[in-house]
Image (cartoon, rainbow, N blue to C red):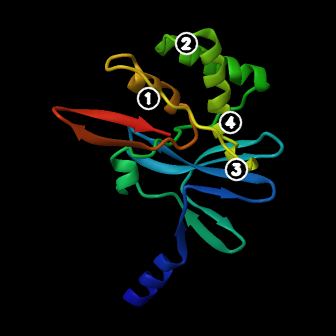
Amino acid sequence: MQNNIKEKKDDITYKTSLFTKNEIYEMGYDTETNKTYYLMGDRDGKIENFLDEVEIDGRKYKPLPARHLLVEKKVILFPSIATPYEDENQILKEIQNFIHKYLDISDVFEQISTYYVLFTWMYDRFNEVPYLRAIGDFGSGKSRMLQTIGMLCYKPVFTEYWVSKGYICFTF
């Protein structure tokens, strides 16, 4: 009996994202219920949320469990829901409004940051990729910038380390 359970567990692959010819599956995470799931979008604009598992070509896939350290410690942030948008201008405006609400930066850098966020969601289509870098004195808003913009980026990675008596947070 235990052999069957072990075999069934081995038949499941844990992944944070999946791509088929017509669909994209991304792992989602709800902090309130502490539950992970897949969000699906297809070429026709159809969206499904809260899929516990996905089967593709006879193979079963599940998102990382909520107890996984990357999820539990919020090293990688995952979206909570997939929602449709009318066009690129709408999503760019929403990104820019979020950045503007939580960050005081120049108009030019606000626009660059807005496009950078969108870029991170399709980075794999490019051969070379840029990255944002914040340089400034203590208290100039580097961490605030990284957290605000990073929160919108595709799978941002947040790491912390001790510096004298506090934390400094970095992301890419």
Q: Name the residue under label 2.
A: 100
Q: Which mark is residue 147?
A: 1
Q: Which mark is residue 87?
A: none
In the rendering, at what x and y percent does residue 43 appear? 82, 46
In the rendering, at what x and y percent does residue 90 appear? 73, 20
In the rendering, at what x and y percent does residue 58 appear? 68, 74
Q: Specify which label sits upstream in the sequence, 1 or 3.
A: 3
Q: Residue 119 carries which label?
A: 4
In whole angstroms, how far apart are the C-alphas of marks 4 and 2? 18 Å
Q: Do the residues labelled 4 and 1 touch (CB within 8 Å)?
A: no
Q: Which amino acid does label 3 sit on?
A: Asp
Quadrant in the rendering for residue 19 = bottom right
Q: In this view, does 132 lie above or below 102?
A: below
> In the rendered view of the protein, which quadrant contains the N terminus?
bottom left
Q: Which amino acid does label 2 sit on?
A: His
Label 4 Cα neighbours within 10 Å, binned few <14 / some 14-19 / many ≥20: some
State the SS at label 4.
Answer: helix
Q: Which amino acid does label 4 sit on?
A: Phe
